[in-house]
Image (cartoon, rainbow, N blue to C red):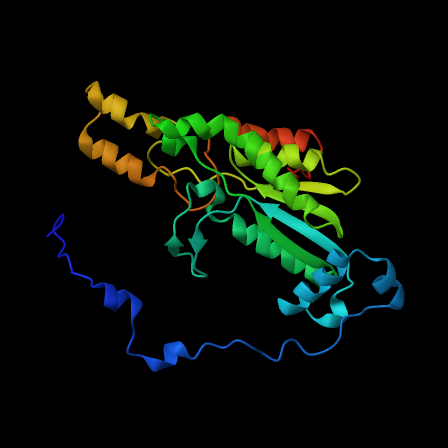
Amino acid sequence: MWKGHAITNITLSAVLETADPSLLRVATHAAGPAGQLPLTAEMLLTEPSGNLFGLTQNAGMGWAPERLLDPEFLILSTHGGLRAENGEPIALGFHTGHWEVGLLVAEAARELKALHAVPFAGACTDPCDGRTQGTAGMLDSLAFRNDAAIVLRRLMRSLPTGKGVLGIATCDKGLPAMMMALASSGKRPAVLVPGGVTLLPEQGEDAGKVQTIGARFAQGQITREYAAEVGCRACASPGGGCQFLGTAATAQVVGEALGLALPHRH
């Protein structure tokens, strides 16, 4: 037994061998997508080989061949975790700030497709220093911004046929990184979409104050029951960054002030 769970002995043969013959019938060939790439003689003579092979990749991923020459736009995000369509978590992210960013990516992609563009999506997820407070993980917190900005810039350059970039980010590491990356987009237009904040609980504490429940309990200021209750409900909705004007929410405001994000209507 280990922590109340029964331990099952697993043999090497159970891992390496199988009695199911269907697992040995591995497909090595397929018919491939129907149709033809919209190639011209000039494209074959003058385009970089990567541009041509990119069309092959796009067809292989299921894009209609007749739409392959539509303008291409890249959607970058800090998406993390894995969310089922009904909202249930399959795998958690590091924080609520990037948990539902994928929904914004999907909506933007659908709109681009409806406008006869070819959307691409890439991501560089981000950590949460609320989660790493008091641990060695904090050593990576500020450094991550520059690292992520470099990765995001490299992803932008990895779609050389792209006509523009849409950056979707929320929190105090990924959002500044995204802003730095978008600022380096050069001649390609770039737009920032902030991810908003998680809702406040109707009763309880915000995501800033609730991070002090351990210290306040140690000082006898709150009970264990109070800490457990407010800690459970502080992030009142599954998506969005911290509710207070820390770096995350402030960076969202700054992105709008800099003209990277479309202004909100009040």
Above or below for 158 versus 135: below
**Residue at 87% across / 62% down in the picture?**
45
Number of numbered discs present? 0
Residue furthest to the top: 219
Residue 165 percent coordinates (x, y): 70, 46
Residue 197 percent coordinates (x, y): 49, 38
Residue 53 percent coordinates (x, y): 71, 62
Quadrant including the C terminus: top right
56 with respect to 46 (left or right):
left
Residue furthest to the right: 42
Q: Nearer the viewer, residue 13 or 154?
A: 13
Residue 252 percent coordinates (x, y): 58, 33
**Residue at 20% across / 64% down in the picture?**
11
101 with respect to 63 (left or right):
left
53 with respect to 200 (left or right):
right
**Residue at 56% across / 33% down in the picture?**
147
Above or below for 229 versus 133: below
Is residue 214 visible in the rendered structure shown here?
Answer: yes
